[in-house]
Amino acid sequence: MRPVLPTLILLAALAVPGAAPTQTTILSSPEALGRALFFDPDLSLNRTQSCASCHDPDHAFSDPRGAASTGDDGISLGDRNAPTALYAALIPPFGRDTEGHWAGGQFHDGRAATLEDQAAGPPLNPIEMGMPDRAAVVARLRANPEYAAAFPALFGAGVLDDPDTGYAALTRAIAAYERTPELAPFDSRYDRFLRGEIELTAEEELGRVLFFSQQFTNCALCHQFGTRAMDPAETFTNHRYFNIGTPENTDLRAVNGASGLDAGLQQNPAVAGDPSTRGQFRVPTLRNVAVTGPYMHNGVFRELRTVILFYNSNNTRNPQRHINPETGAPFDPPPVPETLAMEELTHGPALNDQRIDALVAFLRTLTDARYEPLLDP
C-alpha cells in the first residue's frame, strides 16, 4: 500500500510559498514530491532554472522579469508571457465545451490538454529548461537520493528504470502539487466580501457592478464561468478562445528575433489548422491580475489600466480614446483582422475615466491575500 503523509506533515511541507526544498523535506506524498520538483533547478540542462523561475511564488506564480522568460542558457527568450500557475488546476482539459466551443487546456493555445501535459513541456523545451530528452531528466531524478527513494515508494518499483514511465511520474507529481490549496486559496478581498467579512469601497463596488453588467461592459461574457455572478468558486474566465486583436509585441520581438504570425489556437494540433481559430488565445483567469503584469499573451501592455483602455477603444470613435498611454501612439492594428471577435468586443458604451478606474479598483480586489502587499499604493 502506498505510504500516506500525515495531514500535519503535508501542511508543513506546503506551508511556505517560495521556500526551496531542503535535504530534510519529507517526500512521502505526490504533492510534497511535486513541490520539491517545482523548485528544483537540477531539472534544467545547466541547473539554473526550475518551474518556479518562470512561475515565481513570490510574484503570484508569474514571471516578474518581463514580457517573456529567459531560458536556462541565459540567452534564449520566449515569445509569450508566462501565465500564472495559480488556479491553473481549475482549467478544464482541452476540448469542446457544452456549447461546442474550443475551451480549456494549458498554455495560451491549449496545446497541453492537462496539467500533467503542461508539466511535461518546459524541461524538454530548448529555449526553456533545455534538457535533451526524457532519459536525461530521469537520470537527474535517479541521481538524487531523495527522489530515488520517493518515486518508487509513490509510483511503484522500477518507475525510474524507464524514461517514459519515470517522466510521466514526474509530471503527475508536479500536477499534484499544483492542485493543492496553496495555488488556489480563494482568499482575496473579493472572496472576503462574498463571505460577508468586509465591505467593498464605493469605487470597488462600482467596478464590480460594471464588470458583471451586460449593459455597460459585459466583461463577464468571457470572464465568468457559469451563470452565477457571485459564485465563490469563480475563476473569472470561461476558458474559451477569442481573437481580441492584441497587437504584436514589437519590442519583445526586436530582442528575441521571432518573426511571423503567432497564430495561437490554430497552432494547436488538436484543431487541425482550422482557419477560424487563427489568432485566438485562451481567456485567462483574472485572479491576481493586478500583480501579474505585463499583460496579454505576449506581454505587450505593462499596465492593467492600459488593457481596459484597449478594450474600451472598440466602443468609441474618439481618436483620443485609441491612444496607447504607454507609447503615446494609437494602438497597433490587430494582426489577424479576419477572425476578430467584434461581437464580443463592441458590446456597450464607451467608458469614461471614472468607470475605467472603478474597473481597475475591482480587479485589484481579486488579489489573493498573500499578494496584497504587491499592489501599487
Image (tube, rainbow, N blue to C red):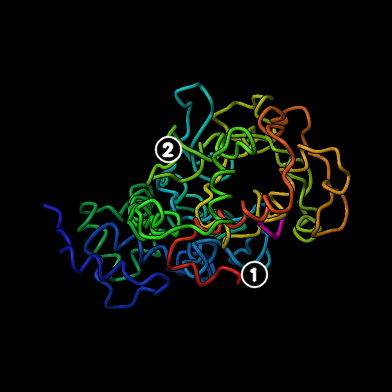
The residue that label 2 is drawn on is 92
The stretch drawn in magenta includes residue 302 = yes
In the image, 89 versus 138, the foreground residue is: 89
- The C terminus, quarter of image: bottom right
On screen, residue 137 above or below 18 = above
Q: Amino acid at mark 1?
A: Gly
Expressed as whole percent of the image width and height from the top left, the position of residue 303 reads 69, 59
Q: CA distance from mark 2 to mark 1?
A: 33 Å
Give the magenta range.
300-304
The residue that label 1 is drawn on is 74
Q: Main secondary structure of the magenta part?
A: loop
Horizontal side of 22 relative to 75 (left or right) equals left
Horizontal side of 319 relative to 27 (left or right) equals right
Does dot 1 land on a helix, a strand or a loop?
A: loop
In the image, 172 versus 372, the foreground residue is: 372
Horizontal side of 63 relative to 305 (left or right) equals left
Q: Amino acid at mark 2?
A: Pro
Expressed as whole percent of the image width and height from the top left, the position of residue 252 reads 75, 58
